Image (spheres, grey):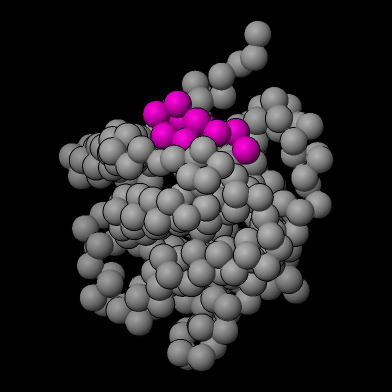
Amino acid sequence: MKFNSILIVLPILTVLMFDLGLTLHASDFVRIVRKPKAMILGLAGQLIVLPLIALSIGSVLGLPSAFFIGLILIACCPGGSSSNVFSMLAKGDVALSVSLTAFSSLITLVTLPVIMQFVTARLGESVGITLPVGNLLKQNFFTMLLPIVAGIMVNHYFSNTAQKINRILSKCAFPALMLLAGIFFVQNKDVIIGNFASLGLATGLLIVVSILIAAGIGYLFRLQRTEKRTIVIEVGMQNAAQAIAVATSPFVFNNAAIATPAIVYALLMNVVLLIYVALLKK
């Protein structure tokens, strides 16, 4: 019997969002006032530039509708939960990274359904792919917003306990994502292997082009070196777990093909960013 991967996708996403909430303080939300330029540029890179890059890549490569929608879905997701770890390794601005991840996670609760409804109506309905927006909003509310708020409350009232829980959960984030990617790969290996060339190229371009544009934005607007590195990582690392959850959820797309780009992206994303960190250290 085939294991239903959604049974671990949604719990993993929920735990990751709870862990994000455990790291947040009031200062993380006022940083947009203290460092408006870096915050606005980082959010613009994630919320505007990334979807446009994905749309351009999918159009140029002529991806099938399901893969095209999956690629844009990745670009519409918030920053990855491990981005603050990569920012620390790259000697970036970790506080800025946490704030960008928090803001993007909240803002995409609105922007993701809007953009995906627009994209699905034009790319998916002709091949039978539809998006129940109400179900997507409900799923994001229970698996993202509530866990983040719960984490913030625990951190506010039980700070020491929050730190202890975070120390454990933060070490589990990357292994959990790789476990998820591994299970999904095994279940859909024929589709992934058969389309790895096109999906590898598409997701690889999404990562590399977004990193280059983010670096260009940082240079053009004369951000500090730590801010540049953080924005590169935040724009180059999206929440693949959320993309998989939206794609495979029986309440939303319920389509393994749409999740396939996110699996390939999750594998390549970590490789590319580890190379980026290694180059910075040299």
Quarter of the picture holding the C terminus: bottom right
x and y percentages locating residue 19 in the rendered image: 39, 40
Quarter of the picture holding the N terminus: top right
x and y percentages locating residue 111 in the rendered image: 34, 57
Residue at 23% x, 75% y: name it.
33
Residue 7: in sight, yes or no?
yes
x and y percentages locating residue 71 in the rendered image: 58, 53
Our reading of the magenta stretch's main secondary structure is loop
Residue farthest to the front, as pictured: 126
Residue farthest to the left, as pictured: 157
In this view, the residue in front, 197 or 278, is 197
27 lies above or below 82: below
Q: Which residues are magenta?
A: 247-257
In the drawing, does residue 183 fall left or right of residue 120? right
In this view, the residue in front, 1 or 130, is 130
State yes or no: residue 75 in magenta. Answer: no
Residue at 50% x, 40% y: name it.
129
In this view, the residue in front, 201 or 83, is 201
204 lies above or below 253: below
